[in-house]
Amino acid sequence: MVGEELAVIDASGMRAIGAGLAIGLTGLASAIAEKDIGTAAIGAMAENESLFGKGLILTVIPETIVIFGLVVALLIK
Amino acid sequence: MLNVKQMSRVTIVGHKDIFERTVDALHGINSFHLEDYNNEDLGLKIGKPFENGEDVSNKLIKIRSISNFLGVKKGNIKKQNMDSVFKELDTKLVELDNEVSKRTGRKIEIENNQKELVTHINELLPFATIPIDLEQYSGYENIAVFAGVVKGDIESKLSNITKSYELFSDSKSGIIVLFVLKEHADAVSDILSEFAFKELRVPEMSGVPVDLLGKMELDVANLQKNIESLDAEIESLKIKYSDFILASDELLSIETQKAEVPLRIATSEHTFMVDGWVPNEDYDLLADTIEDATDGRAFISRTDVTKEENDIVPIEYNNPKITQPFEEIMNLYSRPKYTEIDPTSLIFISFPLFYGMILGDIGYALILMTLAFGIKKLVKSDAVKPLMNILIYCQISTLIFGVIYGEFLGFSLAGLETHGVYIPGLIAGFETINLFPSPFAAEMITYPVHRTHLVMTMIVVTALIGLIHINFGFLLGFINERKNHGFMAAVLEKGSWFVIEIGLLLAALGYMGYISSISGIGVFLIGFVMLLKGEGIKGPIELPALLSNSLSYTRIIAVGLSSIYIASTVNQIAFDMVMPESFGPMTIFAILIFLFGHALNTVLSIIAPGLHSLRLQYVEFFTKFYKGGGIKYNPFGYIRKYTEE
């Protein structure tokens, strides 16, 4: 029984699922992190517009997480 | 090029007799950055504005309010002679003020009349269908009058009470005017309330409503005509005076600026002391001009910038014209400090380079370049121009990488045979050439470089580019640190990173068995201790950043791939899925999908590569050497647009 079920699982399908998880989860992680920073950055900009540059940089820092996710997904593929 | 403009601190002292002349001269040069005086403990007081200050600023307020009212727009006008504007300023300002206020007064009067008439019309309108003179609504001894709106027909019920009544009604609007004997008034009123009677106020006028309405509407139209002719007069005033308004606004702004200078300067009873900064190259001009203006009576002293003053020197970039647009990117982050390397010229190269490596598509490069040139030509704003220049530089780089990658709007230009399947390119007969096998993965380097088939190699290559870029940052950090804190600090804080990297490299070689791994570990430990000594505990915490920062550069390929996939998905939907065999309505639909899809990706092509390339500069590169926080150099003066001396 067990052997039969295993045979149904396709290796390339598993890889695709893994790649999808890598991107999806890291995307969520980036979003959660950026949400907080973005709100704070906009708050700071409302006080002082010259903080736009710094706010932008701080906001995109967590982008790295999803980029790594994308790289991992490419490696799995 | 890598340094900001060198400044001198200049102090000018003199008798108050020559105060105004000195300020005039300084203003004329437009290169002296005033340092505000705010230390009253020294026994010197902040000065009072020049005598003409109040007069000038009153006039300025007047001219600005008129300019606002007329809606004068800044535009290109012939430059006017300053003296002649000044001479006729007073008379012309009074004249203009009279002309404008006369017309605005008249306009407001007419508008009020018009409004009053419109209220009367609104009151009269309900009675328009009742042909009775308005005077006949009141003034009876024995008759009660009901005027208002009812729902339904009241006549049958009314006749139950009395036969002697007079009723005028309009069934459409439900308006009634009812005359009954006073003795029946209460009973009638009860009936009316059953029909939801709402009383209307009868306007206190005389005449039949229809005639009155006709006359009033005519009057309103006439008044409207008057207003329009007044508006036309005001418009012609605007055309006639806009040159004068612009020129005198500028002139008065300059005068106010000068008149208020003493508020920023130290003065005693008879002397003044102007303190500030001037770029070294402009010092001679400054000294000569002030000598001339004051017949040598002002005392000018010049000192070089001391170490304590490094934080308060105003910063002026010193870049060749071609790299100047990138000063905007620097300003977005922070101006360099006086003794720091100004990296504008470096990001002039690296920003477009990374942008191009990410986007790398001939089609998008051409679209965006056309767009940038178009906007630059149409929009004359000083804020937009540098951004468009940056976009153009980026597109040049994108075009070059587009040729290297052989991509056009997501299509591959060259045909490629992969895993036994042949994918034709956009240009028939242009085939991919195999160059050499990739040293990093089981992939073949080709021309054009197919990014989608060289993912592994590109990941390694971009990470290596990152490593080079980061190390370049450390090198700049070394130079900065040596300038500010000496050679030893530079070696410990920045040099230690190189030692650590060499140690890691040796350890890796040792791991692969080329040399003994002891030497690698030893060198690494030396570097580690140096870093600990240079940066404290925060140094070793930063160590993993070496890896994460260089891996961060893999975004160059990752974001690039996402852009390709969006473009090729659009192409696939448009041409493989929707486009029919023969021409039909679906052909147009397919073309629309193609256009909208690529329009969307064009917008994304500015944002995504731009932001990521910017981030690589700001986060990965700048953190290695750059602090920033310089004060903007803001010379005392004015760039004349509408007047000349």
Image (tube, coloured by chain):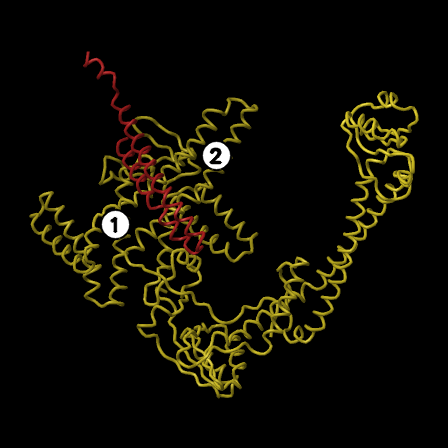
- At 47% from the left edge and 37% from the top edge, which residue is drawn? B600
Position of residue A13 measured from the top left corner of the image (x, y, whole percent): 28, 23
> What is the three-letter code of the residue carrying label 1?
Leu
Would you name the residue on which mark 1 appears? B467
Would you name the residue on which mark 2 appears? B597
- Return the residue nearer the eye: B464 or B98: B98
Q: Which chain is rendered red in the image?
A: A
- At 81% from the left edge and 50% from the top edge, which residue is drawn? B223
Position of residue B458 measured from the top left corner of the image (x, y, whole percent): 29, 41
- Number of numbered callouts drawn: 2
- At 50% from the left edge and 81% from the top edge, which residue is drawn? B289
Q: Is residue B499 above or below residue B180?
A: below
- At 58% from the left edge and 74% from the top edge, which residue is drawn? B53
Q: Which chain is rendered yellow in the image?
A: B
Position of residue B282 measured from the top left corner of the image (x, y, whole percent): 44, 75
Is residue B19 toward the left or the right of residue B10 in the image? Answer: right
Q: Residues within 10 Å of mark 1 (few under 14, many from 20)?
A: many
- Return the residue nearer the eye: B83 or B18: B18
- Return the residue nearer the eye: B107 or B615: B107
Cα separation between marks 2 and 1: 36 Å
Letter of the chain that mark 2 sits on in the rendering: B
Q: Residues within 10 Å of mark 2 (few under 14, many from 20)?
A: some
Query: Going from the N terminus, do you reach mark 2 or mark 1 first?
Result: 1
- Return the residue nearer the eye: B363 or B167: B167
Q: Is residue A12 above or below residue B445?
A: above
Secondary structure beneath label 2: helix
Is residue B486 toward the left or the right of residue B395 in the image? Answer: left
Is the C-beta separation of discs 2 and 1 under 8 Å? no
Q: Is residue B287 above or below residue B162?
A: below
> What is the three-letter code of the residue carrying label 2?
Gly
